[in-house]
Amino acid sequence: MGRIPSLLILAMVLAFPLPQSAAGVDAGVASVAKPAIILWTNPLDIGSRDLFYGPGGKGGQPKEPFTFVEEDRGGTNPKFEVRDAAGAKWKVKLGPEVGPETAATRLMWAVGFVANENYFVRETTVQDMPHHLERGQNLVSADGTIQSVRLQRPWKGKKAGNWDWKRNPFVGTREFNGLRVMMALLNNWDLRTVNNAIYADRKEGNETEDPEYYEVTDLGASFGKTGESYRNSISKNNLRAYQKARFISKVTDTSVSFNFPTHLPFLYIFNFPHFVSQLRHRWVGKDIPRSDVKWIGSLLSQLSHEQICDAFRAAGYPPNEVEAFAAAVEKRIAQLNKL
């Protein structure tokens, strides 16, 4: 066969697609599209975002009165579900994580990360409250009145699982490294996999196309020390500890390391599984590419003092603590932007 016919055959092969079986897919089997995965979306309006009402907005607030549905026995803090006057379900959280989680969620959302819709409620009464809760009974009065609580709207889709800090689709990306910086900024040291969820906006018959959202769902261990301590009152929601904590520990030409998360106190060695579990997350704040640190710092710097204060006002902090926490956050943002 001459040269021209050979070239003609080659051109025909390239012009027509191979059968699926020849392309590495069994004939007769349709290819399956993978759903989009979302950790961060570009927040084009950072300077105008309302950090008082957060991702749910003013119109998304829960509507009183509330009716008890069931107790949630997961996690370490007392929680239960209620239904509001509009029929929407909310998860009520009590205890020391209420304030820091409400504020931290708003700062995460402000710079583009997936975040919960939650609201702080200073006082309300829950109807049909049972006579006994397994946890938090001392925080509920006899008539069902509760004070200083966080109400969180359940995700509109389905939970598709949990994600791990070391093994997830975003490792090495600018957005994931930005998330690592945010955990250091907040001092959110509780990095267990159980606190990271994957949610899917599933619609019947469209399971392969609906996006999956990767979120740090529990930020309650924020705004205290850089690591777990013997008492929650020290390690989370502690203004003085947050102010005193060293933020950046090392800077090189290419990377930045944070003084976060710090190791557990020595006596935790007697709870060896927990000690090891916390130890394996120490890398999260270490050796983050300097360019990625500067990127998330540039987003945070677009927040005004008033916006940052609003995040803490929304969480029920008194005026003096609002200003003090905001100043501490701004000091850290300034350090990021000096790199």
Image (cartoon, rainbow, N blue to C red):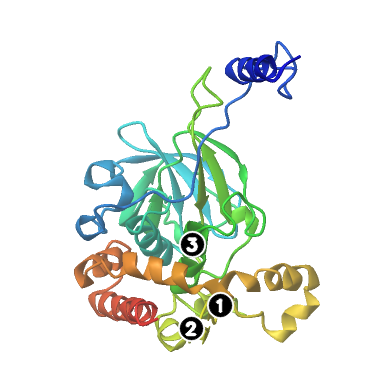
Going by the numbered disc 3, the residue's amino acid type is Leu
Amino acid type at circle 2 is Ile
In the image, 1 versus 275, the foreground residue is 1
Residue 186 position in % (x across, y down): 44, 71
Which residue corresponds to the image point at 67% horizontal and 15% vertical from the top-left?
A: 9
Q: Nearer the viewer, mark 3 or mark 1?
A: 3
Q: Which residue is the site of mark 2? A: 248
Q: From where the camera sits, is residue 96 visible?
A: no
What whole-number distance in Å separates the C-alpha atoms at marks 3 and 1? 13 Å
- The amino acid on which the numbered mark 1 sits, given as a three-letter code, is Phe
- Whether residue 129 sits left or right of residue 20 in the image: it is left
* Residue at image mark 3: 179
Quadrant occupied by the C terminus: bottom left
Q: Is residue 208 above or below residue 290?
A: above
Dot 3 or dot 1, earlier in sequence:
3
Q: Residue at x 53, y 17 (%)?
A: 205
Please state if 23 lies on the left or on the right of 334 as rendered. Answer: right
Residues packed near mark 3 inside 10 Å, few (<14), some (14 to 19) or many (20 plus): many
Q: Residues within 10 Å of mark 1 (few under 14, many from 20)?
A: many
Q: How many marks?
A: 3
Q: Residues within 10 Å of mark 2 (few under 14, many from 20)?
A: some
Say which of marks 1 and 2 sits in front. 2
- Report helix, strand or loop for mark 1: loop
Q: Distance between the Cα atoms at labels 1 and 2?
A: 9 Å
Q: Quadrant of residue 171?
A: bottom right
- Dot 2: what SS? strand
